[in-house]
Image (cartoon, grey):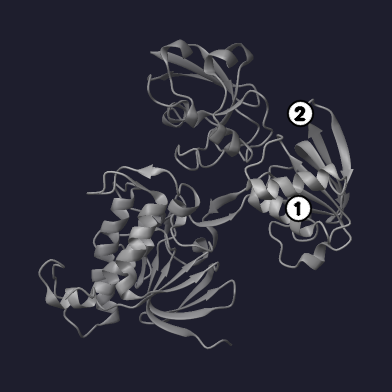
Amino acid sequence: MTEPIKTDALVIGAGPCGLFAVFELGLLDIKAHLVDVLDKVGGQCAELYPEKPIYDIPAVPRITGQGLTDALMAQIAPFDPTFHLGEMVETIERIGDPLFRCTTDRGTVLEAKVVVIAAGGGSFQPKRPPIKGIEDYEGSSVFYAVRKMEEFRDKRLMIVGGGDSAIDWVVNLQPVAHRITLVHRRDEFRAAPDSVNKMRALVASRTMDLIIGQVMALEGEGGALSGAVVRGNDGSTTTIPCEAMLPFFGLTMKLGPVADWGVALKDNLVVVDTERFETSVPGLFAIGDINTYPGKLKLILSGFHEGALMAQAAARYVFPEKRVVFQYTTSSTNLQKKLGVA
Amino acid sequence: MVKITFVSFTGSSSTVEAQPGATVMETAIKNGVPGIEAECGGACACATCHVYVDEAWGEIVGPPTAMEEDMLDFGYDVRPNSRLSCQIKVREELDGLVLQTPERQA
């Protein structure tokens, strides 16, 4: 077994609430590791609306999702948290009182005295395109990510979508695959213009095919794809032979493994109390959009408040012998030292 | 008060009252109209409030913006009369508007 990484607190989710939790924990000398399924920090703020302004952060009249993320990263820098990005916590096992062993889908094992679920709407996962029966082909012929390009060698490959993932893989897999058909619902692409130009050149030289339309059905047997039925915008349908498909329909949020961690849930949200923001499992906390309690508002500012109270409760587990003294960053030299400003 | 009718994939319809200034998505969610999910809460960041605008209303409602077209790429069975209902603001002229909801949101 991999040697576990030992830490005081493990924060699951590096969105705004997870990031700010690091600050509140840090003021109380609690060291934190963060795990996030995305390959970047910021959660929904960075993934769904990096450019969109947020107007309800206290004392900040207007800030973009990315701006808020950057500001939080600067704010927590003095506490030097460790990030495990592109990983999803799959299992949480309570092995002490409290002590948790958490394992990610990449095999990272972390042991933490407290765990904070700050997973927002759950984990971002590739969106399954709405094609009937596609489940039967997933993992054998239909893939949502490219792990090894060689898997597509000499195959007739259909790539679906119009964003960067779709167009980049068209360009990169073109030399590997037998032939690529790109299917997109309109003749406009969201991907970077440079990649789109490369793709257009491949189409112009008849090296690959581009079809404007939508995939309506799949054909094949026993998980082995043989073709896809594509409906053009004029309503006509054609069956395009292919052995593999890469659909890129963006990301969606799924509760994911949280449901298996033994915490009480209500309507797919984690039930917490409003004094400690602790779940039904002692030492396991939940803050931000993922939790629920009477009067809950899914606001970033609520998640910040929840993080502050959670940290006070977490300190009692991490330092059972120590009395937690409440201090202000404006006046406490002790806190200012931790922030590197004293 | 503006009235909006939502017709589901199976043909059942519900007519709700809408407040000018609100979005059609907000109106649907507030009234529990089935077939509208609005996963992102109205940020034009998903495609789960997808509707088809009834032919008679196409011109009055208008076409999607470029950003909305981008998001519609993630929708299911997108058609020329597809819109994201979070991007349609309720106006007095939309009184009587008829929208169809798709078989499923993406």
* Side of A92 relative to A131 (left or right): left
Where's residue A117, x and y in %? 41, 64
Q: Nearer the viewer, residue A255 or B41?
A: B41
Tell me the distance, in whole angstroms, between the alpha carbons under discs 1 and 2: 22 Å
**Kind of residue sitting beneath label 2:** Asn
Q: Are marks 1 and 2 on the same chain?
A: yes
Above or below for A50 versus B105: below
Q: Nearer the viewer, residue B28 or A167?
A: A167
Where's residue A94, x and y in %? 44, 78
**Kind of residue sitting beneath label 1:** Val
- Residue A233 marker: 2
Report the quarter where the C terminus of chain A lies: bottom left
- Residue A309 marker: none
Q: Quadrant of residue B82?
A: top right
- Residue A170 marker: 1
Which residue shows up at 70% across the image and 34% down it? A186
Viewer-side label of 1, 2: 1
Q: Is residue A279 visible?
A: no
Which residue shows up at 85% across the image and 32% down it? A237
Q: Chain of mark 2?
A: A
Where's residue A83, x and y in %? 45, 72
